[in-house]
Structure formats: C-alpha cells, structure tokens
Amino acid sequence: MKKTEHPFLVFSKKGSKINKFFSREIKLPERKFPPRFIVSTKNFFCGGYFVCYNQQITAKEIAKACQGRNWGYLANLIADFLVIYADYSSKEFFVLTGQLGGFPCYFFKAGDKLVLSTDFGLVKENLSSVTLNKNSVFDYLYFNYVTTLTAETIISEITQVPPGTLLRIDSNFSFSLTPLVDLKNFLDVSLEPYNSVAEFADDTVVALGKLVSSYLETLGQVKFGADLSSGFDSSLVCYVLKKESKKKFPCYSLISRYSLGDTNPEAVQEFARKHKLKLNFLKAEPFYPFAKAHDLAWTKKHFYPGDHGQELRFQLFSLGARDEVKAIFHGYGGDELYSAFLIGENRRFSIQREYFYAVAGLKWGIDKIFTEEGIGVLLDRDRFAQKRFYPSIIAPSAIAERFYYFPIYWETGVWGISPMSDPRLILFARQIPHQDRKVPSKQEIWQHRKDIFVPSQFVKKGDYQKQIGQFLIKKKDWVIPVLENSILAKRGWINASEIINDIHQGKIEEYLKEPLIVLHNVLRLEYFLQHNI
Amino acid sequence: MGKKYFINPLAVIFHPVLDKENNYETIVFNPQTGDTFKINRFGYSVLKTIEDNPGLSLDYWQDETRLAKFVDQMARENVVSER
C-alpha cells in the first residue's frame, strides 16, 4: 500500500490547542467518499468524514448534534463516520466513531502529549518507546480480533476507539471511552421467526433490495463496483445491486488454483452471464501472505489490518481504483446474518464463548504453536475476567472486516460497503426459522431461488487454506529467520524451535490445517515486533 | 465421607461485571464434547461456591436433593470433577 495522508492530530500541552486555532492543528485530508466535512466557528470545531445510508444529514446538523452532546443519536445512525469535535469554551475534545466500524481511530496520551490518527503506524512513530500488550497479542494470535471488540491494541501505549464509541478528553487532559451502541433497544424488539424458509428467503431479497436502494441513493453519482464470489452472499448483493441500480458496474472475483474457497470460476462466470454482469478476475496465487515486499513493508510499519488476506484485498481494491470506482460492495457479514437470532445470547455471554473457543483449540493442536506457558496465557481465566469489551449489533467478526481493512480502503481511495452487516437487515434476519441454535444451511435457504443463483453454486464449499499456506511452502527462507529471531519465543510463548525443525524436515502438513491462521498471525506479528520493539 | 467437588477451569469462567449484568446466569462448556449449557441463578451460585471453595462436599448445602441432581449433571458434563 502506498502511503496517503491520514487524519492526524498532535497536542503537546494540556488543552492549549482547544481554541480557535484548533482547525489549524488538525489534519483532515480531503476525500471523495466518504466525504470530508468541516464546520468551524469561534466557539467550536466540528469535522471529519461522514456518510449516512439511512437519512440525509448535513454537516451543520452533525455539528448541532455534537453541540447538544447528542452522541447516541449519531453513533446509532446507519453511517460510516469519524467525527472530531472541539468545544473551545469547555476545553473538551471529542472523537466519535460510527457503529458500522468504518473508521478506526488510534491514540496515545503520555504526559502533556496526545497523538491521534486513523493510521496506527503514524501514532506509533510518535512514541519514544513501545511496550507489547500481552492481552491484545493473544487476542490477535488466536482470535484474530473477531470475537469481541476492545479498546486495546498490540501496543500498550496505544488505545483504539472501538466502533460506536465516544472518546472524550477533558480540560484536565484525562480521557474516557463511552460505548454508545444501543444494543438493548435493538434486542428489545420482539420478533417471531418465519414458519417457512422460502418465505424468509424471499423477504430477505426484498429487505436487501430496499437497503441497497438506500445505499445507491446515498452514493448518487459516485461510481461503484462489487466483489463477486461463487458463494451466496456476495452474489446475492450483486444480483440486488443490478436489479436496483439498473446500471452496469464492474464485479471483481478472486480466483486461485491452489484452493477454490468461495470462488469457483465456472460458477462465477455462469452467474455473471445469467445476470449480465461485467466480470474481472484477479488471480490470487501470487498474493499469498508474505509473498510481496509491499505486504511486508506495510506490516513492518503499520501492522493493521494484520490479516492473511490484506494483500489480496489490496490488489482487489486496486482493481477498483484502476476502474475509478469509489466504493465496492461486498458480502461481508453474510455468514453472521443467518445466526442473527442468537445475537442476544451471543453478546450476553461473549466472554464465555470467547474463552470456550480458546479451550476448543486444545483439541485441534494449539500446542503445535504455543508453549505450555503460552497456552497458560491464552487460557488465563483472570485475563478473561478483567476484559472490557464494547457492545455491537453487528457481529464483531463482520465489523473486524471493515475496521481493520480500513487502511486498504483509505490507501486505494475505494470504500468498502457491507449491506449484509447493516443493522436493519440484521434486525430482519432475526426472524430466520430455526430449531434451538440450528438454522437451515444457505443451500437450503436459497434452493428455490434458481432465478437468482446458478446450479453450480449449490455445491460443497471448497477450502481456502492452501492459498494461505503457500507461505510455508514457498517462503521458507523468510519464515525460518523470522522464527529464529522470535520475540514471542523469547517471552516463552511460542514453540519457534520446534516449528523451525518441522519446516526443515518438511513436516508441514499439520501446520496447514487448523493451526495455519495462528501460525500466520505469529509470523505477521513477529515481523512487526522485530522492527519495532 | 462425601465426595469433594472441584470446578473444571476449562468449563466455567466467571466475570464479575458481566455476570452481574446477566443476573447471575451463565453458560458452561463441556470440553470433551464441545457442548455448552445454560445455567440459571441457582446453578451459578452452586458453581461459584465450588469455585471459591475447591473441594467442597454437598454437605455444605441444606437443599441436598436439588443440589445433588445439578452437581451430578455438571460432573457428567465435565464441568465439575469429583474426587
């Protein structure tokens, strides 16, 4: 990813700059979508980036809501935003993020200095020394940040503002984070499940159609494209987009001969022909994790997204940039949508579920990666008992896709839009027919909609591990030195020597199964740490 | 002498804030089968008491019948161990 300018703010003295010169201090680079807004008066500054998908709201109205401290109203809009508000009279300063998780915001406060940006790397560069945050390290290595939302980052000194959260910095320069997502109100809506799967499926198409129509209205003349796989979610989004927009738009499809995953090229082609979609294939093979200098350089400096798909996603969004599209629709959140009826219970017992998910790792071999001490940290019950997590209507796994992929959207200038993660659709999807915790499979749900889907989509999904696992086959010369210098091994958490021996002896089969993503995460974090700690 | 009970640390987790918010209902996990079970206030209180007093026997409680049934079920689900 090339480096483009990010929103950035540095305070060097307590409250000194929360005055009429504030607008000079804050850097808010222009952007086409979501657009930048600024309302600056002698009493306050209000600015940031804002796009709302369920109603029209002007910059002045945003500023008015901030003046009235109407944070809950803003946070619960169906909107992507980062709002920065400085009140010159009270010498308070606020940052508000939207519940859809469009914008991350990282900051540190040390003595009289506060640094804040959407770019983790930029904030880190302003720190004189950094400390590893053990909790966040294990949350990343094992959970990939998809189970709960927290304010922690891999660096203890740096805090992130979770989605739908208000950061307040008062005149004494102390800060607080207030979660604002109204999950209770959302769960209080009483809904009965449909009796018929077919009826539920039909009404899902109608509900998605209405949503997509509101997104298209918001986009106006902004050119858009769509991610298209042979799975049901992105293809449904493409179908609805075509129907509602009545426009030709480019679709992008990742394919790899190593593993089919969600994308069987024949099925995608058949689908594209059926609905007259303009299809662009991106061959994924060269972009496996750590393959490209560009991927490594980004990880070294900025760390986040920290995901195995970051380079692929960057390549896909770069195709969009080439076509001058400013937004790409995708199907993220689709998997979570079908279990929306469990939101209440899942959020209520999120820490327990997260812990039990970690315990389950003992069965599939986390001891291939973690030492006994490492497993002890991962399963430390006190660690879980002290966790503070933030509420969300959208599943943390679906939010993570946007929250952590933000740098790609920013760098390419192409915004990701996830109608499947829209709280309005999630509310509707709570009515899915189910028995206990079981719902029909996607194939069962969509089997009668042959007008939308093509026969080759109704097959068992392929796995995607082989594409990711190429780094163990083709990048041994990079993997081994990284493990030899392992900081995590020096802390006693990782079996680096055993993994190196296994790689030398060609015993990599076990690592290509369940432990693969954890091993990937170890390597990505190692690479970052070895250049920054 | 009655059996002594211990919490299986892989099967139960207590969270002071969350548990209070949840009105002291929780879920527990059978690490052998991967199944989870919902636990009401009564069960929560039993499990928390065992957690705080490892090796407790059923004699500790007055209402032994209801309790024995619950603890027996928890033992079968590998949530508590008996020695």
Image: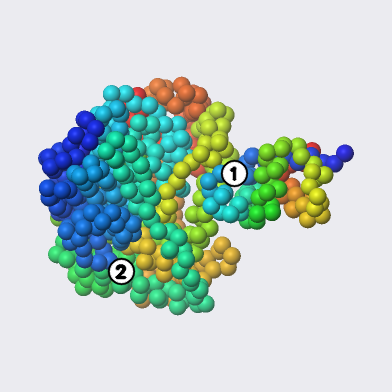
> Position of B63 compared to A77: left or right?
right
Residue A278 in sight here? yes
Indicate left or right for A107 with A463 as reference: left
Quadrant in which the C terminus of chain A is drawn: top left
* Residue drawn where x is 40% and y is 76% of the image: A202
Residue at (45, 31) in percent of width and height = A134
Residue A459: percent from left, percent from top: 45, 63
Q: Which of A51 and B58 is in front in this view?
A: B58
Decide if residue A397 is in sight here: no
Which residue bears the numbered disc 1? B14
Q: Check contact, mark 1 vs mark 2: CB within 8 A.
A: no
> Residue A342 at what x, y percent from top left?
51, 61
Residue at x-position 29% and y-position 40%:
A170
Q: Where is residue A351 in the image (x, y as percent from the top left)?
A: 52, 47
Q: Quadrant of the N terminus of chain A?
A: top left
Q: How many marks?
A: 2
Q: What element carries label 2?
A: helix
The three-letter code of the residue at mark 1 reads Phe
Subunit of label 2 = A
- Relative height, residue A316 to residue A207 (above, below): above
Q: Which of A331 and A268 is in front in this view?
A: A331
Q: Closer to the camera, A104 or A388?
A: A388
Helix, strand, or loop for circle 1?
loop
Mark 2 is surrounded, within 10 Å at the Cα level, by few (under 14), some (14 to 19) or many (20 or more) other residues, namely many
Residue A29 in which image quadrant: top left
Q: What residue does disc 2 label?
A: A211
Mark carried by residue A422:
none
Compare residues A30 and A181 and report the one nearer the observer: A181
Residue that sits furthest to the front in the current view = A89
